[in-house]
Image: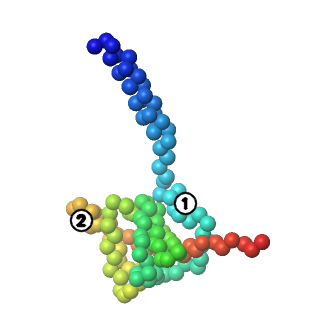
């Protein structure tokens, strides 16, 4: 049994090196505000609008405690609610739009994914469009 001890020690040392290397390669987790900054890199803010088309807005990203980001084609619409502290990506947003658009005055509730209980109410603000900046001609 003693003959196996050096092999075991080498195997354990190799495992520790691999595990340590993986830990060193792990990227630090970005805060929601940093994630928003990263999403908006290379984009320029346009004039805020009070409504966006629901038919064109396919993607929604909830940035906890910060903002809602809707993607419409290559444009990102950022909505910073008046009560961003109630935004939680673990909740589901339930909207009751008055038509085919989502507007700042529409009712938006947050609902717990597992219990289906209403957890809050979001007061939407204006939607700020962010479009990619075109490279300057040389």
Q: Residue at x 42, y 60 (%)?
A: 64
Residues at marks 1 and 2, CA–CA distance in whole angstroms? 32 Å
Place of residue 55 in the rendered image (x, y in percent of width and height, measured from the top left): 40, 83
Quarter of image, res 9: top left
Q: Which mark is residue 66?
A: none
The residue to which callout 2 is attached is 117
Residue at point 47%, 57% (across, down): 32
Q: How many badges with numbers are in the image?
A: 2
Q: Secondary structure at mark 1?
A: helix
Question: Picture quarter containing residue 22?
Answer: top left
Residue 101 rendering spot, x and y as whole percentages: 41, 84
In this rendering, the label closer to the viewer, 1 or 2: 1
Question: What residue is drawn where x is 38% and y is 25%?
Answer: 12
Residue placed at 44% from the left, 34% from the top?
A: 18
* Observer-nearest of 34 and 104: 34
Quarter occupied by the N terminus = top left
**Can you see residue 123?**
yes
- Residue 33 coordinates in the image, percent (x, y): 51, 58
Q: Is residue 120 left or right of residue 56?
A: left
In contact (CB < 8 Å): disc 1 and disc 2 = no
| Vertical order, 88 against 77 (above or below) | above
Residue tagged 1: 38
Residue farthest bottom in this picture: 99
């Amino acid at each position: 049994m003693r003959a196996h001890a050096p092999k075991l020690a080498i195997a354990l040392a190799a495992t520790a090196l691999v595990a340590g290397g993986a830990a060193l390669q792990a990227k630090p987790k970005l805060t929601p505000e940093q994630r928003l900054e990263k999403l908006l890199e290379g984009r320029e803010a346009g004039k805020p609008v009070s409504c966006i088309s629901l038919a064109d807005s396919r993607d929604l990203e909830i940035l906890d405690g910060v903002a809602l980001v809707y993607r419409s084609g290559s444009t990102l619409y950022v909505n910073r609610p008046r009560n961003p502290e109630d935004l939680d990506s673990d909740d589901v947003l339930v909207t009751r739009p008055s038509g085919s658009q989502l507007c700042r005055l529409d009712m938006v509730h947050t609902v717990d994914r597992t219990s289906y209980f209403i957890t809050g109410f979001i007061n939407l603000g204006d939607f700020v469009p962010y479009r990619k900046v075109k490279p300057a001609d040389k």
